[in-house]
Image: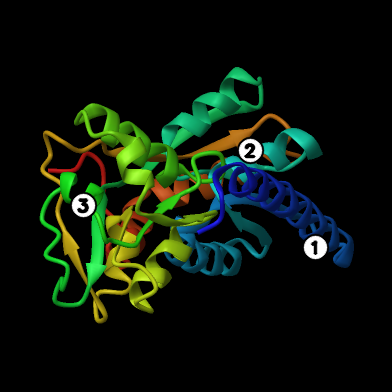
Amino acid sequence: MIPGAFSTALHKTLLRCRVVCVAIVLALLCGCHSKPALTLYCGAGIRPPVAQAVEEFSRLQGVRVECAYAGSEVLLSQLKLSGRGDLYMPGDGYYVAQAEQAGLVASTRPVCCFVPVILVSKGNPKNIRTLADLARPGLTLGLGEAEACAVGRQSSEIFAKNNISEEEINRNVVNRALTVSDLANGVKLKALDAAIVWDAVAAGVADQTDVVVIPPEQNIISTVSIAILKTSSSPELAAKFADFLASEHGQEIFAKHHYTLCPPK
């Protein structure tokens, strides 16, 4: 395991690198075509349904929607840095609120909800049954980097809500991931005994993993909204895309990919 101070510095360096990479990708995309397009900053954990929705919307409207997928905090930093873009869809309403406070948001639409779950290896060989079990010695645990992705920040809030010492949890953490997808892959490949991920992300690796449900009274559910940005050069078209995601057909796409529709039961 990497020593604490070096690990923190490393994660911050990786976060800065991810922001720069997103900036380069967007610049290349914008420079490669003359046809008008929408630019969407989208949380990595929402990629499967959004990719399908983008394909269908682009075909229906005859436009391009260029997507930058990364952790929610990374995207927010890039959004502030670039001062451009049409849409922002992070993995939690917290980041939309941060964008609103920064004066970047014109309007929002709720799209779906993320329910945190504990993802474990198939058959749950380490017999993990509760949140408190994640502090048990001998486990290899993955959590999201709180300064990079929504699931990392949410995990910290869940531990605090249930009076579980994050210091004890951190003794088992061997991976602070920049995206929730990295965590799911870690459990899938048996590099991790467990990780806290979104329910929809867990569904994507269900053939090689199992889920331990966090009781509703112990959990914190995230509302996923799409924000139309004040920097949009095509605000009417951006609003059409947001409405498409919130429409009945858009909701069918999210349900098809096992995303929880709002409000969850």
- Whether pointer 3 and pointer 1 mark residues with C-beta atoms closer than 8 Å, the reply is no
- Whether pointer 2 and pointer 3 mark residues with C-beta atoms closer than 8 Å, the reply is no
Q: Nearer the viewer, residue 36 or 183?
A: 183
Residue type at numbered disc 2? Leu
Q: Secondary structure at mark 1?
A: helix
Q: Which one is in front in this view, the residue at disc 2 or the one at disc 3?
A: 3
Q: Nearer the viewer, residue 132 or 26?
A: 132
- Whether pointer 1 and pointer 2 mark residues with C-beta atoms closer than 8 Å, the reply is no
Q: CA separation, marks 1 and 2?
A: 19 Å
Residue that carries the numbered disc 3 in the rendered image = 136
Q: Nearer the viewer, residue 15 or 9?
A: 9
Q: Residues within 10 Å of mark 3 (few under 14, many from 20)?
A: some
| Above or below: residue 104 compared with residue 233 | above
Residue that carries the numbered disc 1 in the rendered image = 29
Q: Secondary structure at mark 3?
A: loop
Quadrant assignment for the C terminus: top left
Residue 212, quarter of the rendered image: bottom left
Q: Residues within 10 Å of mark 1 (few under 14, many from 20)?
A: some
Residue 253, quarter of the rendered image: bottom left
Q: CA separation, marks 3 and 1?
A: 46 Å
Q: Position of residue 236 (x, y in %)?
A: 63, 39
Residue type at numbered disc 3? Arg
Residue 92, quarter of the rendered image: top left
Identify the residue at horizontal 24%, vertical 54% (top origin): 137
The reply to whether residue 23 is visible in this rendering is yes
Residue that carries the numbered disc 2 in the rendered image = 76
Q: Earlier in the sequence, mark 1 or mark 2?
A: 1
Identify the residue at horizontal 49%, vertical 62% (top origin): 47
